[in-house]
Image (cartoon, rainbow, N blue to C red):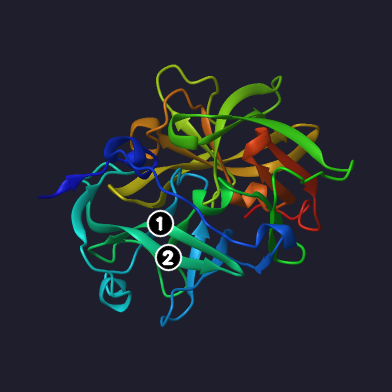
Amino acid sequence: MVKVLGSWAQWPALLGLALAFTSAGARAADPQVPITLVRDKTMVPVRFEGLRELHLILDTGMGFDGLLLFKPGLRDSLGIRNLIDAKIPGAGGGPPSDACFADSVCFCVGEVRCENQRIVILSESIMGSAEVDGVIGYSLLGHYAVGIDFDSLTLALHDPQTFAPAPDWTSLPLTFGQNNLPFLETAIVVEREAPIPLRTYVDCASSEAIELLLRDDMKFTLPQETTDAYLGRGLSGDIHGKRGTLAKLILGPYELHDVVAAFAPAEIRSKAGGADAVLANAALRRFNLVFDYAHARLLIKPNSHFDERFE
């Protein structure tokens, strides 16, 4: 039997999933993990016993414990038994992707051992690259206050019950949509008008700075000058739209200027209801961050990349 999993943010609800996370002895030490940036995406190293280190994108869109792996060859390398065939819709205008999945799998992120995890492996190499093996999200974000330092390229896993930020951090409130998708209030200035408030969800797996979702009732107008653009590929196919430059992107008290933005049809780019835009990693990496889901907040502090020109 082939299961239709829905977008990955929906998988736990559709399949009645209740997974556990175990990291015995790791939280007390606030372990740190080296990260890299690949095309403005934050890459986290993940280890399976007897397999090479995998390089996975930190993805706030994954609202369950587990991994999505892009490379079909990993199915044999991991030696996982009792795989179940599945179909996975996602961004894009085409049919769902074929995949297989298994539960109760174990892997490690630095010193942290993650047990009873769901592993989903795509059946075709439609995503990823030599540098990117897949994505990881809630296995870290749902259980730690996850600090990302883009100056030192380290990821710190803090105990959310004891974590206390220094006073120089700015706290932005998060709300959560279906299956733990984090939303943040932002604002933009397209040309010279007053700031336009937007309900924005956070997608660290996107290399854009911000993606404005096009629909009939959108709150903004497009810049006077835009170009047609191929914006990438989702689990349901290619995404086409436009690019243009915003005068400002506003996060709390901070303003980013001359921001290159993507504009994509909402029905193709996003399955999240009520979103005006997607805040992505080319903007976020200009701050050091702490995702603190337990206290429904994103802590930000400008870093050495803050004034870099958007490409």
Say if residue 190 shows up in the picture. Answer: no
Earlier in the chain: of badge 1 and badge 2, it is: 2
Instruction: Identify which residue, 131 or 50, lies in the foreground.
Output: 50
Marks 1 and 2 sit apart, C-alpha to C-alpha, by 6 Å
Q: Is residue 42 above or below residue 52?
A: above
Instruction: Identify which residue, 250 or 110, lies in the foreground.
Output: 110
Question: What type is the residue that disc 1 sits on?
Answer: Gln
The residue located at (70%, 23%) in the rendering is 195
Say if residue 156 shows up in the picture. Answer: yes
Q: Which secondary structure, mark 1?
A: strand
Q: Is residue 271 above or below residue 151?
A: above
**Badge number at residue 117:** 1
Task: Tell me where residue 190 appears, x and y as whole percent.
Answer: 63, 30
The residue located at (18%, 46%) in the rendering is 3
Task: Pick out the residue farthest to the top.
Answer: 217
Picture quadrant where residue 175 is located: top right
The reply to whether callout 1 and callout 2 are in contact (CB within 8 Å) is yes
Task: Tell me where residue 133 appears, x and y as whole percent.
Answer: 42, 68
Question: What type is the residue that disc 2 sits on?
Answer: Cys
Q: Which secondary structure, mark 2?
A: strand
The residue located at (20%, 51%) in the rendering is 86
Instruction: Identify which residue, 45 or 70, lies in the foreground.
Output: 45
Q: Which residue is mark 2?
A: 106
- Few, some or many residues within 10 Å of mark 1 (<14, 14–19, 20+): many
The residue located at (40%, 56%) in the rendering is 117
Task: Tell me where residue 121 appears, x and y as whole percent.
Answer: 30, 62
Residue 40 placement, left or right of 13: right
Counting the numbered discs, the total is 2
